[in-house]
Image (cartoon, rainbow, N blue to C red):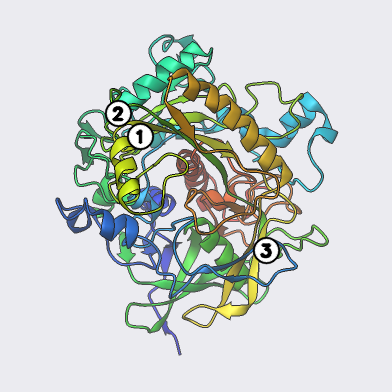
Amino acid sequence: MANEQQKVDAVIVGFGWAGAIMAKELTEAGLTVVALERGPHRDTYPDGSYPQSIDELTYNVRKKLFQDLSKSTVTIRHNPSQTAVPYRQLAAFLPGTGTGGAGLHWSGVHFRVDPVELRLRSHYEERYGKSFIPEGMTIQDFGVTYDELEPFFDQSEKVFGTSGTAWSINGNVVGKDKGGNPFAGDRSNDFPLPAQKRTYSAQLYYKAAQAVGYHPYDMPSANTSGPYTNTYGAQMGPCNFCGYCSGYACYMYSKASPNVNILPALRQEPKFELRNDSYVLKVNLTDDKKRATGVTYVDSQGREQVQPADLVILSAFQFHNVHLMLLSGIGKPYNPITNEGVVGRNFAYQNISTLKALFDKDTTTNPFIGAGGAGVAVDDFNADNFDHGPYGFVGGSPLWVNQAGVKPISGLPVPAGTPAWGSQWKAAVADTYTHHVSMDAHGAHQSYRNNYLDLDPNYKDIHGQPLLRMTFDWQENDIKMAQFMVSKMRNIAEAMNPKSIIGSAKKEGTHFDTTVYQTTHMNGGAIMGEDPSTSAINRYLQSWDVHNVFVPGASAFPQGLGYNPTGLVAALTYWSAKTIRDVYLKNPGPLVQA
């Protein structure tokens, strides 16, 4: 028999960026809030204490801050004809666990969104015609515009302490020849801090991109370029380019995280409580499944608990949100055969390609210096900033050098043909480690009918519940885009005059490889939209079926973006929270009529 806790106004499942933002907004509105985080307590101290925190073996190799796959994981297959098997070793993607979630271990790349990507299907149909979108591609509009979200991008940047160079503010160009991005959406205010300094790799890349006619700019970064106090009174120190961002808690208090930027303010809120080691099993519903009554979870001592609440926020990692909706019976599960149902639909990822330019010893790039969000990018081929018509693929990609700090164990590029071990390998490492530049095409990944999520019929987690099953593989459109982007990125690499370039685009027939890291940018499965027959939540991130359940996070994205997802996740969460505060709490019910 589960023990029932005292009822609260709102229960939040998962305490990463979305959960922390929601907790702060709802307590400000006067609600009593309990946040349930499945992982352990984590914070900048002791998890980010120096020098223990700059330990590649512990954090990047043994993956201390990430999900324990022996307790819960996903199963993966390439297509429905296969039997999915569990993802048993962290490699391709790295979901976080513990206080801060992925917001503690992320790199700090903090983009907004290209306005076109919020209305992607409408834009492509208007510019290229409906027939341009390949059969089986299920992209759709978000149901919200850039102009509607702009104030919330601004709000989140002030919370994060984001460093960058604006291109235009209120329609006035201010960033020409200063490192601004001419393709960026207009802003109401400048970045809170100026852009970070360029590493030598970024300087080489900037010059080479200009030489081939592209438009390089400084990447927006949630790694501070100077001391900063955010809108909640949380203090941050200036980044020292130590290179230990992605996969680590920042010991300098320089990388934005829920732990640094929001939790200190929440600790002052008597109406807020965070419970770690609390594994949520399901959302509890009324008999008619029209309203949530709270959640059931397992506490740190293995006891089953019920937390009653008037409002349920699912703000866990992307596929955990989808998993909980499926386990709880919220929304109709997606069926790829009939193309009906909404929960599990439009699962998407990131379409990454990497090149490395290798130089002679007279060009020293010092790649161990770095910051997670620092770098130089070009957007000439992102979103729809070029004519896709002649190339026959949907989607775009920023191309960048994002020198985040190349580590001495995992960051060892060597020329093609080098043996995998021995004296020749050691000599090649010595020749290339401080004499190379790595660059990426960070391609937007589209959604397809046959890439989806559902419950696995064979495997269960530590609590006896079915694992989430991921059916996913690269499609023809992904291959075409990757090959195009690599050709454009190679132009920049060649303009640097290296002695060689290693890396290539995906080839035809390439399958998704779970053993090689790509990104942790998982999208979709509980997507937002304007039509309840093709979306699980409405434009305010509210469940179409259960009006007091809201689902912020990248699970809401109908397809992937060219940019990293965190900036849009934060803006959408603030957008949703404001609507809850201003509208929903005064008259609880559906915010959009189905």
Residue 269 visible in image: no
Q: Which residue in the structure is indicated by mark 2?
A: 365
Nearer the N terminus, badge 2 or badge 3? 3
Position of 202 compared to 146: left or right? left
Mark 3: secondary structure: loop
Residue 438, given in percent of the width and then of the height, sits at: 41, 34
Looking at this view, is 530 or 583 the one in front? 530
Mark 1: secondary structure: loop
Q: Quadrant of residue 1?
A: bottom left
Nearer the N terminus, badge 2 or badge 1? 2
Residue at 79% over, 31% down: 125
In the image, which is nearer the foreground, mark 2 or mark 3? Answer: 2
Position of 468 compared to 545: left or right? left
Q: Are marks 3 and 1 in contact (CB under 8 Å)?
A: no
Looking at this view, is 481 or 168 the one in front? 481
Mark 2: secondary structure: loop
Give the answer, above or below, for where 384 lies relative to 174.
below
Nearer the N terminus, badge 3 or badge 1? 3
Residue 131, given in percent of the width and then of the height, sits at: 85, 35
Q: Which residue in the structure is indicated by mark 1?
A: 403
Residue 73 is tagged as none
Q: Which residue in the structure is indicated by mark 3?
A: 331
